[in-house]
Image: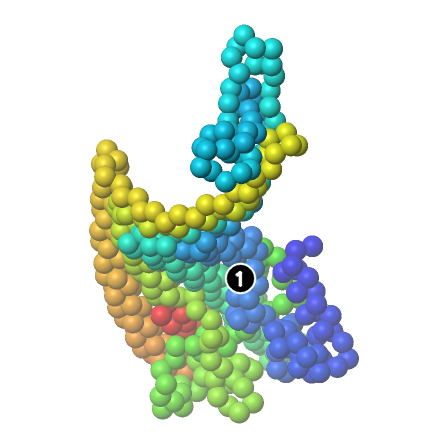
Amino acid sequence: MTGAEAILLGWVFAQAGGAAGAAAAAEPGAPRSEAGGGRGRVLSLSEARTLALGGEAAEAARARIRAAAARVELARSRRRPQLEVRADVSASPGGELLEIQADDLDPDAEPGSVFISGTRDIDQARAAIPLVRYRSELALDWNLFDFGKTGAAIDAAEAVRGAQKASARADQAERLHTVDAAYVAWVAAWEQTRLERQGLDRLEARLESLEGRVRVGLLPESALGASRAEVAAARLRLAESEQLRDQARLRLERELRTRLPAFEPDRSVLEWGKAASASSAGRSQIVANEDTEENQEDGTKSAAGTEPGPPNVTGAPIDSIDARVRAVRARAESARADARANRSRPRLGAEAVVGVRGQDITALFPLYRVGLGIAWPLWDGGASKARAEARVADARALDAERRRLEAERAQVRRQHDLSLRHARRRARLAAEWVRVTAEHLNDVEARYAEASATADELARARSAHRQARGQLLRARVDRTEAFLGL
């Protein structure tokens, strides 16, 4: 079982308990039941996005960021003193330490013995016998100043870390946008199925009424043919919409890499992106128990009467492009800093060594050394210059890529702004169309019951109403997609 499946099962058990409200309060991220009772558990878009943010891709992004942070520490370590313990043992002939009196070398020297190194001639008996030598020391090496080379390397590493974080945010935004598209398609398919079910229920109720009138002799048997054909066609449309609904759910499950048992989508997402003005809401009321109008979503509004808002999670194409721009800018900064780090610079360093050394087990001597030195590279065959120029060229290429992404971001923003404006206008017009066709359908049905309207006229009225409802749904879906794109 995957982690996402475990979360979903936990939500199912929490919602199935007797104290569903208390469980929802204890589990802020748990799916909520749709208002009205008797419906499936609702999986909101926020919850779907939360599920999408886990998995191997997120772990790989975190690992890349940790690796970049480790490289920053690696670069910073060059400014810190390096401390190490060294020990070695060797055996070789020659260089034997011989103890002699100091006054044998210098008559004016103070009395005492000293050691000198000597090597026996090959003709002597012990010339080839190896001597064991050993040394143990504690060494300190400190890069005091390298004229900005280490600082540039640190800047380059930090820029790479920033680029990795920005790339991870861009990947996350693209991932969430894919989940958004799958979720909205699921909502659209679910809503289409609901509309087809409502239409079928209405036609079946109408057919039942006509059959009752036929049984009492008010209508001939032939009056049922057209109604039965409409019911059969509606059942076929319902079966097709249920197939599309299940396919949309499977697509979302594939994106989330988990199953969605007993869950319904949150239809309130189709309210996102609607114009803030509520004046148009009252202009499009549908008569005759129709709940498909844009402002009457059967439980998608909160108890206070306000529309639910979108989740506070990034995931739009604009967010992805913004993150890509930041990543490219950071990589360009890293390239420039790396170019500075690759230039030849002098190095000022300090060294301190303390320890002991000896020969065999008869001689042991103290060892220490303190030094301060500067190294100035004169010529490396042009390698440093070539590396620096290559990184500068990389930075210029990244600058060009950043400008291209910024232009693309502006274009995408304009495109989604335009799509949102058109979708809002289409939704208002389609809602008015639904209202008009609903009134006309009610009138035709009443006249058909009085035998003053033909079956063809009734079929045309129902087809127009069904077409208007479909146009309204498509406009609302397009509006939500455009809104999420921003």
Amino acid on which the number 1 mark rests in the picture = Leu
Most extreme residue toward the top, as rendered?
123
Residue shown at the point (29%, 71%) measured from the top left = 417
Count the marks: how many? 1
To which residue does mark 1 refer? 53
Can residue 471 be seen here? The reply is no
Left or right of 407 on screen, residue 98 = right
Give the x, y percent position of residue 301.
52, 84
Quadrant of the image containing the C terminus:
bottom left
Q: Badge 1: how crowded within 10 Å, few (<14), some, or many (20+)?
A: some
- For the point 50% across and 40% down, which residue is it? 110
Point 26% across, 62% down: residue: 406
Q: Position of residue 292 (x, y in %)?
A: 48, 78
Asked whether 70 or 53 is in front, the reply is: 70
Q: Secondary structure at mark 1?
A: loop
Q: Position of residue 135 (x, y in %)?
A: 57, 37
Measured along the vertical axis of the image, is residue 437 above or below residue 370? below
Residue that protrudes farthest toward the right in the picture: 18
The quadrant where residue 129 appears: top right
- Please report the residue visible at 70 percent of the width from the left and 74 percent of the height from the top: 15
- Which is nearer the eye, 383 or 29? 383
Does residue 374 appear in the picture of this structure?
A: yes
* 287 up-or-down from 223: above or below: below
Q: Quadrant of the N terminus?
A: bottom right
Q: Nearer the viewer, residue 434 or 60?
A: 60
350, above or below 448, in the image = above
415 left or right of 440?
left
Which residue occupies the foreground of this view, 267 or 474?
Answer: 267
Percent across and percent down for residue 247 are 54, 56
Coloring scheme of the render? rainbow
